């Protein structure tokens, strides 16, 4: 495997639980490094742009509302096979189906409020990173 970068969001429900340190520690313990990070509150426009692929789905409005309901932590994670590794650390989308010890099993509340987002492919990672970070904001760690 090669060194990759992937995009991750710690979602509002995990932020409210003060879980940043625990979640970042899980990434770092599994060989991922933070190459960029920022805490922000997403605008409706930015959330709609990010989740544009879900626009026709019935949960779109609720998803956008949730993602703009409070602060999020946006990150670029870097490491060997970062996309797949991040997805393994996060666990299944549904926290009830996520393996014990994964981020979503520990901090997710339900399918919609599942604590974290992670890119599903290197192509998605590139698109998502470009949406939230300028090139100069991402360090090669």
Image: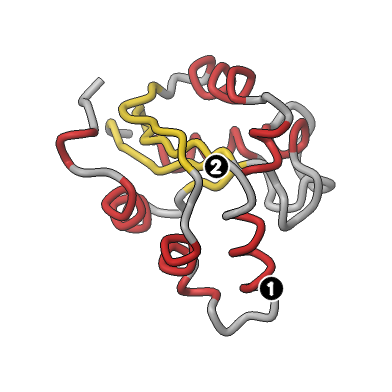
Q: Quadrant of residue 21?
A: top right
Q: Quadrant of residue 26?
A: top right
Residue topped by disc 1: 59
Q: Nearer the viewer, mark 2 or mark 1?
A: 1
- Relative depth, front residue between 16 and 108: 16
Image position, residue 121 (x, y; %): 40, 54
Please state if 19 lies on the left or on the right of 81 as rendered: right
Image position, residue 35 (x, y; %): 31, 27
C-alpha separation, residue under disc 2 versus residue under disc 1: 22 Å
Please state if 73 lies on the left or on the right of 115 as rendered: left
* Sequence-first tag of 2 and 1: 1
Label 1's element?
A: loop
Please state if 34 lies on the left or on the right of 10 as rendered: left
Q: In the drawing, what numbered circle is on residue 96? A: none
Residue topped by disc 2: 87
Q: Residue at x 43, y 66 (%)?
A: 45
Is 109 situated above or below 4?
Answer: below
Q: Residue at x 54, y 22 (%)?
A: 24
């Amino acid at each position: 495997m090669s060194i990759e970068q992937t995009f991750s969001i710690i979602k509002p429900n995990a932020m409210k639980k003060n879980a940043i340190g625990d979640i970042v520690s899980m990434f770092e313990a599994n060989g991922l490094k933070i190459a960029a990070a920022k805490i922000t509150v997403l605008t409706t426009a930015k959330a709609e742009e990010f989740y544009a692929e879900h626009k026709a789905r019935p949960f779109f409005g609720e998803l956008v509302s949730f993602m703009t309901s409070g602060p999020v932590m946006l990150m670029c994670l870097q490491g060997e096979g970062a996309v797949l590794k991040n997805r393994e650390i996060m666990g299944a989308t549904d926290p009830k189906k996520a393996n014990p010890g994964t981020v979503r099993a520990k901090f997710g509340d339900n399918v919609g409020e599942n604590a974290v987002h992670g890119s599903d492919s290197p192509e998605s990672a590139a698109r998502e990173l470009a949406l939230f970070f300028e090139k100069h904001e991402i360090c090669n760690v």
